[in-house]
C-alpha cells in the first residue's frame, strides 16, 4: 500500500497574495500546501481521494498517469472543485471515471456539474459514473475500503481505512464506534487546521489527543491552514511518532 500526499492545505485563511505571514512567504517546500488530497495505490489500483481546486496542478506535479476511481470525503468545494479536469483521464484511458461518495455528495456534484449529467451532453464534457456508498466496507479494484464517519461541525464526512492505513480530513468529532474502526493502525492521517479553537476542524492539540486515543504506530497531520505556523517550528512541538504531512510526501505500508 502506498499513500501519496498531493496536497495538505486548505482554503481557510487569507489568500497568499494579500497575506504577510511567514508561512505564505516561506521558501521551504514543506510550507507550500495545495488543497488536501491523496492517492492510494495497491497492486496496480490507483484511487484518488477528492478533486479540489488544485487537482490539475497536483496531477501534473506528481506525474499521475492513470486513475481507477475518485473517492470523495464530502461535498465542500475545496474537495470537489477540480472535477472537470477528470476529462483528461477520460481521453487518455478511454473510460468513464467512477466516482464514489455518499448520496448527499453525489447529489451536490450533479448540481454543481449539471452539464456532465445532461441528456444531451456537450462534446468533450467529462464523463463519470456515480457510485453511492454507505458506512460499510466496499472494494475498488484490489483495494478494500472501510468508511469512517466523522462530523465536520454538523456535516457528516467520510474518512477511509485501507488495510493498516487510514485517512481522515475535515473532522471535528468522531464517535466511539467509529474510533473503534481505527484501532491497530500502522499509519493514521488526521486533520488539524490551526492551534486556536475552530467550530468545524480539530485543533493541533485536539488532533494530538485523538492520536493518543487511537494509538497508531505513526500519525501524520494534514489539512493545515497557514495559521498553523511554519512546518519546522510545529514539527518540533509534536510527540515522537507524530509528523506534519507535506505535499509530495509518500508513505508505504
Image (cartoon, rainbow, N blue to C red):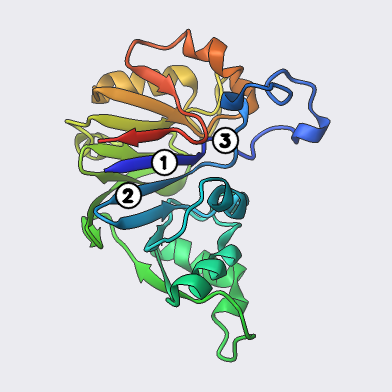
Could you say where residue 53 lies in the image, as x and y percent from the top left? Answer: 62, 52
- For mark 1, what is the residue? 4
Quadrant assignment for the C terminus: top left
Q: Residue at x 74, y 32 (%)?
A: 14
Q: Residue at x 45, y 77 (%)?
A: 94
Q: How would you rate the neighbour count of disc 1 (Cα within 10 Å): few for under 14, some for 14-19, many for 20 or more?
A: some
Could you say where residue 185 lies in the image, as x and y percent from the top left? Answer: 22, 31
Total marks placed = 3
Q: Determine the image quadrant of residue 162.
A: top left
Direction bottom: furthest residue:
120
Could you say where residue 120 lies in the image, as x and y percent from the top left? Answer: 59, 91
Q: Residue at x 47, y 32 (%)?
A: 222
- For mark 2, what is the residue? 41
| 91 in relation to 48, above or below | below
Circles 2 and 1: CB atoms closer than 8 Å: yes
- Visible residue check, residue 71: yes
Whichever of callouts 3 and 2 sits on the residue coming sooner in the sequence is: 3
User: Toward the viewer: 195 or 88?
Assistant: 88
Disc 1 secondary structure class: strand
- Visible residue check, residue 173: no
Q: Nearer the viewer, mark 1 or mark 3?
A: 1
Checking the image for residue 69, the label placed there is: none
Whichever of callouts 1 and 3 sits on the residue coming sooner in the sequence is: 1
Instruction: For marks 1 and 3, give the CA distance.
Output: 14 Å
Q: Determine the image quadrant of residue 180.
A: top left
- For mark 3, what is the residue? 9
Q: How would you rate the neighbour count of disc 3 (Cα within 10 Å): few for under 14, some for 14-19, many for 20 or more?
A: many
Amino acid at each position: 500500500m502506498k499513500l501519496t500526499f498531493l496536497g495538505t492545505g486548505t482554503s481557510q485563511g487569507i489568500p497568499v497574495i494579500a497575506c504577510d505571514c511567514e508561512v505564505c512567504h516561506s521558501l521551504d517546500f514543506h510550507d507550500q500546501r495545495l488543497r488536501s488530497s491523496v492517492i492510494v495505490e495497491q497492486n496496480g489500483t490507483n484511487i484518488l481521494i477528492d478533486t479540489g481546486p488544485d487537482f490539475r496542478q497536483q496531477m501534473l506535479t506528481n506525474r499521475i498517469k492513470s486513475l481507477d476511481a475518485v473517492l470523495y470525503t464530502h461535498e465542500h468545494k475545496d474537495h470537489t472543485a477540480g472535477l472537470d479536469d477528470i476529462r483528461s483521464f477520460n481521453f487518455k484511458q478511454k473510460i468513464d471515471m467512477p466516482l464514489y461518495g455518499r448520496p448527499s455528495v453525489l447529489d451536490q456534484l450533479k448540481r454543481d456539474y449539471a452539464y456532465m449529467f445532461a441528456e444531451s451532453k456537450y462534446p468533450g464534457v467529462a464523463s463519470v459514473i456515480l457510485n453511492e456508498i454507505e458506512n460499510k466496507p466496499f472494494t475498488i479494484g484490489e483495494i478494500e475500503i472501510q468508511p469512517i464517519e466523522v462530523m465536520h461541525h454538523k456535516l457528516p464526512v467520510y474518512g477511509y481505512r485501507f488495510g493498516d492505513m487510514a485517512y481522515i480530513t475535515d473532522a471535528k468529532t468522531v464517535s466511539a464506534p467509529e474510533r473503534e474502526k481505527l484501532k491497530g493502525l500502522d499509519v493514521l492521517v488526521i486533520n488539524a487546521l490551526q492551534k486556536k479553537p475552530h467550530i468545524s476542524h480539530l485543533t493541533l492539540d485536539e488532533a494530538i489527543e485523538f492520536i493518543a486515543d487511537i494509538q497508531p504506530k505513526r500519525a501524520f497531520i494534514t489539512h493545515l491552514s497557514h495559521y498553523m505556523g511554519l512546518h519546522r517550528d510545529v514539527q518540533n512541538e509534536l510527540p515522537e511518532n507524530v509528523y506534519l504531512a507535506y505535499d509530495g510526501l509518500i508513505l508505504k505500508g
